[in-house]
Image (cartoon, grey):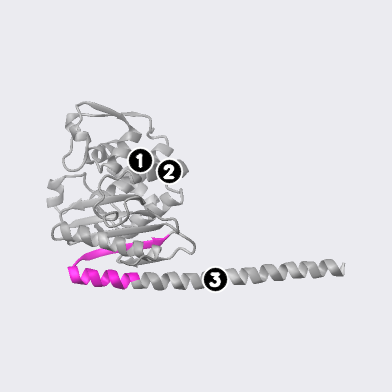
Amino acid sequence: MIKIKFIAIGIFAVLLVSVFFFAGFTVFEFHQKNKLLADLGGKISDEAVKEKISYSLIVKDLTFPRVQLSYRQDKAVVAASLMKLPILGAAFKAAEEGKVSLDQIVTIEVKDITGGSGVLKTMPMPHKLTLESLLETMISASDNTATNKLIDLLGFDYLNKVFGELNLTETVLRRKMMDFSKRRQGVDNYTSAADISVILESIYDKKFINCQFSDLALKFLKKQKVNDRIPRYLPKDLTIAHKTGLERGVVHDAGIVFLPGGDYIITVLVDKAKGYVKPKKFIAQISRLAYNLYTGYSD
């Protein structure tokens, strides 16, 4: 009996030491990560001052412990095509609730054609496709026609209600894509770096409505056709799942970068932009700085 007690005490002691060691290592790693991110924040700030860029930012480590660098992350900014990510979430929610089906056929007619980015406007009309294909086109080709068709299908009220349910506190849809009349009246769509990062993290964790929809969202984002920001200065063989946004005065990109040593989220929203060239390059430079941090690479 005494021998058994000693064995039990020994096991407990080993477990206790292991817990304290792990906790100590975690605290150390947490502080190390925070220091590296703080250094990154300083470099980004210097670049922004030099280029006179107004921006919002989140860079978040997706390995444990998850730490992030953030700047003006809760500022509401004109969303441009980043609005398509929350709309994707609302469409998945509608599918989960049985309001729509991913297999249902949607018909695009001449009256649905919207200018700006996208491929549907080039198709012979009427054009039929599944709701799933419509969603993929909205994300991978940033298709404005697809987006506006989804707004018609789901409605402004439903979309904004689901944004609230998804804890997107600064995200609101007030007009369709390319509605310049509403924009001239000051009516616009808004989101924040924090809200977009919440979506990306939920996709990564397979909690974007559910596991199936998370996998679909990731597939769509990996097919992104506009790669002149986050991927611009990164190795071409990297896997990056991201969504861009571009409109007068704003230039955005947000995504997940997958690395062997650990993945991370990077969300950069540029507002008060004068032109597109400098903001796009700024986002690309931030992306490279983050990549260097997570890989230990130095340019």
Say whether residue 36 is magenta: no
Amino acid type of the residue tagged 1 in the rendering: Ala
Q: From mark 1 to mark 2, how far is it between C-alphas?
A: 15 Å
Quarter of image, res 114: top left
Question: In this view of the protein, which residue sits in the foreground, 223 or 252?
Answer: 223
Q: Earlier in the sequence, mark 3 or mark 2?
A: 3
Q: Secondary structure at mark 3?
A: helix
Q: Which residue is mark 1?
A: 91
Is 44 contained in the magenta span? yes
Residue nearest the viewer, comparing 184 with 202: 202
Image height of 282 relative to 216, above or below = below
**Rendered image: mark on residue 215:** 2
Badge nearest the viewer, 3 or 2: 3
Q: Residues within 10 Å of mark 1 (few under 14, many from 20)?
A: many
Which residue corresponds to the image point at 29% horizontal and 38% vertical from the top-left? 137
Name the kind of residue labelled 2 in the image: Asp
| Sooner in the amino-acid sequence: mark 1 or mark 2 | 1
Q: Disc 3 versus disc 2: distance between alpha carbons?
A: 32 Å
Horizontal side, residue 11 vs residue 5: left or right:
left
- The amino acid sitting under disc 3 is Phe
What quarter of the picture does the N terminus occupy?
A: bottom right
Q: Which part of the image, by quadrant, shows the C terminus?
A: bottom left
| Residue 88 position within the rendered picture, expressed as x and y whole percent measured from the top left | 34, 43
| Position of residue 241 in the picture relative to residue 148 (left or right) | right
First in sequence: mark 1 or mark 3?
A: 3
- Determine which of the numbered discs, if any, sits on residue 25 in the image: 3
Give the spatial CA distance, label 1 vs label 3.
42 Å
Residue 271 is situated, as x and y percent measured from the top left of the image, at 21, 61
Magenta residue span: 40-61
Hey, which quadrant is residue 59 in on the image? Answer: bottom left
